[in-house]
Image (spheres, rainbow, N blue to C red):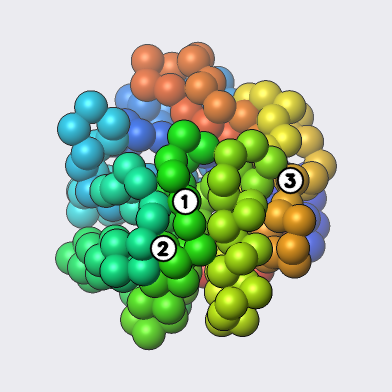
C-alpha cells in the first residue's frame, strides 16, 4: 500500500481532481505546485463545456506515474426520479466498462449543490450500482442544498442506500499543497453516512488547468482504480 509522505498507512491519502485531461505538462505542473498526488479524480465522459472525458492514454499515463484514478460520472444535471437514477447508473457502468475499469471500484455520481435531488433518484442510482461490478459513490454537499434530506430519506426507505460511499465537499478550508493538507474533517449527513472522501479545496489556479484538492481514507483508496 502506498503511504502518503510523512504519514502512516492509517492516514488519509492526498490527491486532486480536474475537469481537464491530464497531460504530462499538466501533471508536472501539479506535482511542482502542490505535490505528487496519490490519486486523481477524473470524469468518465466528456460533457461539453464542463469536462473532458477520461481516455485510455490518460489512464496509462497516470498509472505509469503510480497515481490511482477516482472515477466520476457527471452526464446529468438533475438527480430526481427513480428511473432517472437507474438510467444514470447504467450510463456510468457502461462508461466504466468501456474504459476497462476493474470490478470493485467505486464510481462517484457528481451531484452538484445546484441540482435538484430526491430520495428516489438516489435509490435508483445506488441499487443499480450495487447490482453491477462496481460500488456506488456520490459526491455532494451535505450542508447546503437538498442532498442531505434526500439522502437521509433514501436511507430511511431503503437500508441498502447506506452502502453508498460519500464524497463531501464541505467544509472547505481551501486548496493546499500535499504537505500542508488539513486533518480529515469533512462535513457529513445528519443521518449516518459513510464519508470516505473530502474535497477540501476548489479551483486551485497555480496551473493553466485548475484542480481541486482532496483527501480519501485508506478504505476508499483501496477501491480506486
Residue 84 in sight from this viewpoint: yes
Report the disc number at residue 186.
Answer: 3
Looking at the image, residue 166 lies above or below residue 146: below
Residue 32 in sight from this viewpoint: no
Residue beneath label 1, please? Answer: 117
Q: Nearer the viewer, mark 3 or mark 2?
A: 2
The residue that appears at 29% across and 69% down in the rendered structure is 83
Asked if residue 49 lies left or right of residue 138, the reply is left
Q: Do labels 1 and 2 touch, CB within 8 Å?
A: yes
Q: Earlier in the sequence, mark 3 or mark 2?
A: 2
Q: Nearer the viewer, mark 3 or mark 1?
A: 1
Asked if residue 140 lies left or right of residue 135, the reply is right
Label 2 SS:
helix
Mark 1 crowdedness (10 Å alpha carbons): few <14, some 14-19, many ≥20? many
Report the disc number at residue 219.
Answer: none
The residue that appears at 43% across and 17% down in the rendered structure is 207
Label 3 SS:
loop
Residue beneath label 2, please? Answer: 121
Q: Nearer the viewer, residue 153 or 136?
A: 153
Amino acid at each position: 500500500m502506498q503511504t502518503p509522505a510523512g504519514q502512516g498507512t492509517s492516514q488519509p491519502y492526498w490527491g486532486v481532481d480536474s475537469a481537464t485531461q491530464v497531460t504530462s505538462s499538466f501533471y508536472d505542473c501539479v506535482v511542482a505546485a502542490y505535490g505528487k498526488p496519490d490519486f486523481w479524480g477524473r470524469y468518465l465522459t466528456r460533457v461539453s463545456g464542463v469536462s473532458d472525458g477520461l481516455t485510455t492514454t490518460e489512464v496509462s499515463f497516470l498509472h505509469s506515474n503510480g497515481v490511482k484514478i477516482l472515477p466520476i460520472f457527471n452526464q446529468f444535471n438533475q438527480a430526481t426520479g427513480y428511473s432517472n437514477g437507474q438510467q444514470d447508473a447504467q450510463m456510468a457502468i457502461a462508461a466504466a466498462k468501456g474504459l476497462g475499469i476493474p470490478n470493485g471500484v467505486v464510481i462517484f455520481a457528481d451531484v452538484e449543490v445546484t441540482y435538484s435531488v430526491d430520495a428516489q433518484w438516489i435509490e435508483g442510482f445506488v441499487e443499480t450500482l450495487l447490482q453491477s461490478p462496481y460500488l456506488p459513490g456520490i459526491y455532494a454537499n451535505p450542508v447546503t442544498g437538498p442532498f442531505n434530506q434526500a439522502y437521509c430519506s433514501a436511507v430511511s426507505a431503503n437500508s441498502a442506500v447506506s452502502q453508498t460511499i460519500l464524497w463531501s465537499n464541505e467544509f472547505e478550508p481551501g486548496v493546499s499543497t500535499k504537505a500542508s493538507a488539513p486533518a480529515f474533517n469533512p462535513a457529513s449527513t445528519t443521518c449516518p453516512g459513510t464519508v470516505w472522501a473530502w474535497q477540501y479545496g476548489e479551483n486551485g489556479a497555480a496551473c493553466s488547468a485548475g484542480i481541486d484538492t482532496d483527501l480519501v481514507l485508506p478504505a476508499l483508496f483501496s477501491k480506486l482504480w
